[in-house]
Image (spheres, rainbow, N blue to C red):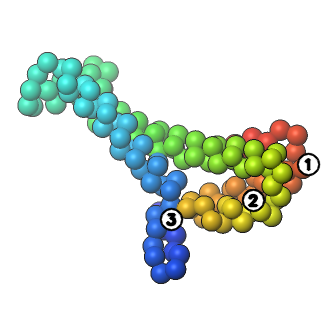
């Protein structure tokens, strides 16, 4: 696991893209679980068993596995979408007249992980030579 904390002036901050991905990884499976509990019509252990059976597509022991897979997919989707939104914002700033150097300075100030900053910097290098700019 990489260290995605940002140190600024003696303060330690967690990168914004990591916070978003963790919220998605926890929140989406939890929402699915809570909704399946509420609509099960049971209470207590029967509600849990019913929810796991519904989430597990007919098999109760598949429910936790489906929730874990959904958590991983949610985290990856959130990381990808944060990078995509940041790249689209940078592309629009470049179209509005910002130079590559000023965009690099802005990226350095973003509260994002170093890995994301490096990807964004690679994305903006040579903007004037690119006809269509989409970060993959």
Q: Position of residue 36 (x, y in %)?
A: 25, 25
The residue nearer to you, when weighing 48 against 133, is 133
Drawn side of residue 74 relative to residue 108, left or right: left
Mark whose residue sits in front, 2 or 3? 2
- Kindly indicate the quadrant of the structure image that contains residue 28: top left
Can you identify the residue that label 2 sits on? 103
Question: Mark 3 falls on what kind of element?
Answer: loop
- Residue drawn at (64%, 43%) of the image: 84
Residues marked 3 and 1 touching at CB (< 8 Å)? no
Question: Mark 2 falls on what kind of element?
Answer: helix
CA separation in Å, label 3 and label 1: 32 Å
Question: Mark 1 falls on what kind of element?
Answer: helix
- Labelled disc at residue 4: 3
Q: Is residue 42 above or below residue 125?
A: above
Marks 1 and 2, the one that precedes in the sequence:
2
Q: How many marks?
A: 3
Drawn side of residue 103 relative to residue 2, left or right: right
The residue nearer to you, when weighing 87 against 96, is 96
Mark whose residue sits in front, 1 or 2? 2
Question: Where's the C terminus, which quadrant?
Answer: top right
Can you identify the residue that label 1 sits on? 129
Mark whose residue sits in front, 3 or 1? 1
- Residue drawn at (64%, 48%) of the image: 86
Q: Is residue 62 visible?
A: no
Drawn side of residue 31 relative to residue 40, left or right: right
- Labelled disc at residue 101: none
Q: Is residue 5 visible?
A: yes
Q: Position of residue 131 (x, y in %)?
A: 88, 40
Q: Is residue 53 above or below residue 117?
A: above
- Residue drawn at (83%, 38%) of the image: 132
Crowd around label 2: few <14 · some 14–19 · many ≥20 (10 Å): some
Marks 2 and 3, the one that precedes in the sequence:
3
């Amino acid at each position: 696991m990489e260290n995605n904390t940002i140190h600024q002036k003696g303060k330690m901050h967690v990168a914004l893209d990591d916070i978003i991905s963790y919220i998605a990884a926890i929140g989406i499976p939890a929402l699915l679980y809570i909704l399946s509990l509420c609509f099960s019509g049971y209470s207590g252990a029967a509600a849990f068993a019913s929810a796991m059976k519904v989430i597990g597509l007919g098999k109760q022991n598949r429910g936790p596995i489906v929730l874990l897979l959904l958590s991983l997919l949610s985290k990856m989707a959130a990381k990808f979408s944060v990078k995509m939104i940041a790249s689209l914002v940078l592309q629009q700033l470049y179209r509005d007249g910002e130079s590559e150097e000023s965009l690099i300075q802005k990226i350095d100030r973003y509260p994002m992980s170093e890995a994301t900053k490096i990807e964004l910097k690679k994305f903006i290098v040579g903007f004037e030579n690119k006809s269509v700019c989409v970060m993959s």
